[in-house]
Image (cartoon, rainbow, N blue to C red):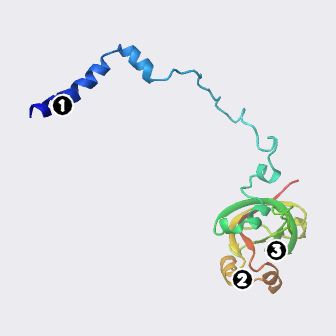
Amino acid sequence: MKKRTAIFLMAFIAPVLFGSGCETSEHDAATEPPMTASPTVTPMLTPETSPSPATSPGVPAWLADGATHSVAGITGAPKALIGKTVTVVAEVDEVYNSRAFKLDGGPSLTGGVKQDLLTLVPKVGDFPIIDEQWKNSRARVTGVVLWMEPKNVEREIGWELPRSLEAKFKGKPALIARSVERLER
């Protein structure tokens, strides 16, 4: 029993003896590394001082115009965007009718065949009439990306797709518009 008590007392006394061997300031200096770098202060950006996306170097035009995705980005990797809302700014490559047009995909991200994005305007809603004047002009479209499966798409847009569009775009991503705006050059 005396042996146990001695071991117990040594367990409490040893840390006290080791800790009392130096001054408190010496102990703090030994355990905390000195600060050598001064803190960096980032200036607060205001609308007057923050750079404009349109004037920032290296910013693509589609991003500067308020887009969240490029056509090539959507057609190049559509699985990640199916069912998601995106905003695209691109040139109207072809107008099929007043509710269907194709956005130009530009150069392909994979170096393969350029893929354009079929954009469909629902029957219900306040949308501009898309006509031949839109061709070769830029448009900003916000909408939901879906696979071009005729029955699902027709349910979303509220009108029947022409068979030529079904055949041409089946199995590819399509953009179901929620808003459409023609942009000035």
Q: Disc 3 on helix, strand or loop?
A: loop
State the separation of the CA atoms marked 2 and 1. Answer: 83 Å
Amino acid at circle 3: Ser
Q: Mark 1 points at which residue?
A: 7
Q: Disc 2 on helix, strand or loop?
A: helix
Q: Is residue 74 above or below residue 11?
A: below
Q: Name the residue under label 3.
A: 98
Of all residues, the one furthest to the left in this rendering is 1
Of circles 1 and 3, which is in front?
1
x 35%, y 14%: residue: 22
Residue 107 position in % (x across, y down): 86, 61
**Left or right: where 105 falls relative to 156:** right
Amino acid at circle 2: Pro
Residue 165 position in % (x across, y down): 81, 81
**Left or right: where 11 falls relative to 99:** left
Residue 79 lies in what quarter of the image? Answer: bottom right
Q: Do the residues labelled 3 and 2 touch (CB within 8 Å)?
A: no
Q: Is residue 13 above or below residue 81?
A: above
Q: Mark 2 points at which residue?
A: 150
Q: Disc 1 on helix, strand or loop?
A: helix
